Amino acid sequence: MRLDKFICESTELSRAQAKRAIGKGEVTLEGVVVKDPSTKVDDSSEVTYGGRPLRVRGPRYIMLNKPLDTVCTSIEDDYRSVLGLLEIEKAETLHVAGRLDIDTTGLVLITDDGAWSHRITSPKKQCGKRYRVMLAEAVSDDVVERFAEGILLKGERHPTQPARLEIVSSKEVLLTLSEGKYHQVKRMFGALENRVTGLHREQIGNICLDDNLESGEWRYLTEQEINLVD
Ligand code: URA
């Protein structure tokens, strides 16, 4: 890769700032000052910036406990983006693997590894997402079967994929979906003439939201958690 890209991927500098730093002689390659940003380097090259040895940052994998009134896009209008909660370098290069609505809380996975996030969001992979759902009305006796059979949503031609529903109490359930249609949980309960009053994602595939994370807090995934997405 080019030297300016290497600097950009291993420091807080933008590409333009990296080029300027190289031009000013602040970067060395194998102990020698190099002033050409297009110089070729690889991951094992010994590069320093301002005397500091650099390593290319690997892909990043993060779990965050999404608070209410935040959005999962990078665009901030009236509401804060979850990416803004990270306060880490180059957060704008990250994306959310499976968005939640503004009024949904809980587990959000964030990464810059597109192939990894594709395995979470691709319909073909059928990666399960588990939600704790609070409801306005008590669930009906046949609700487990209705979700297992699939529900025809307004404006759709085919019913939803079979979903697993566990009843916690008359107005609280755990729902596991293997697909991610727009506002799916709310629309499914809407089709049964019920209304979602609280929605919290607890699990994606085999990755569970860490109980130690308060609302708005985040941490990097462990190697083991990263490998749970296959
Ligand atoms: N289903 C919804 O209705 N909203 C979400 O945020 C996630 C799933």
Image: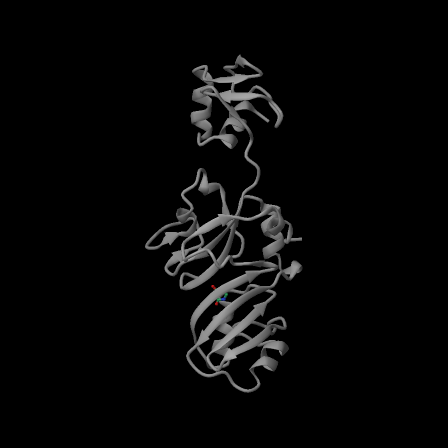
Name, please, the residue furthest toward the top: 32
Residue at 46% from the left image edge and 14% from the top image edge: 25
Front residue of this view, candidates 145 and 192: 145
Q: Is residue 66 left or right of residue 57?
A: left
Picture mark count: 0
Q: How is the image coloured?
A: one colour
- Image coordinates of residue 79 in percent, x first then y, are 35, 55
Q: Would you identify the image quadrant in which residue 67 lies?
A: bottom left
Q: Is residue 217 above or below residue 151?
A: above
- Image coordinates of residue 129 in percent, x first then y, are 57, 63
Front residue of this view, candidates 23 and 200: 200
Residue at 62% from the left image edge and 71% from the top image edge: 161
- Image coordinates of residue 86 in percent, x first then y, are 42, 46
Q: Is residue 129 visible?
A: yes
Residue at 46% from the left image edge and 22% from the top image edge: 19
Q: Is residue 100 visible?
A: no
Locate the N terminus by quadrant: top right
Q: Is residue 35 left or right of residue 228?
A: left
Q: Is residue 224 above or below residue 29?
A: below
Name, please, the residue furthest toward the bottom: 141
Q: Is residue 195 above or below residue 215?
A: below
Name, please, the residue furthest toward the front: 212
- Image coordinates of residue 208 in percent, x first then y, are 55, 59
Q: Is residue 159 left or right of residue 48?
A: right
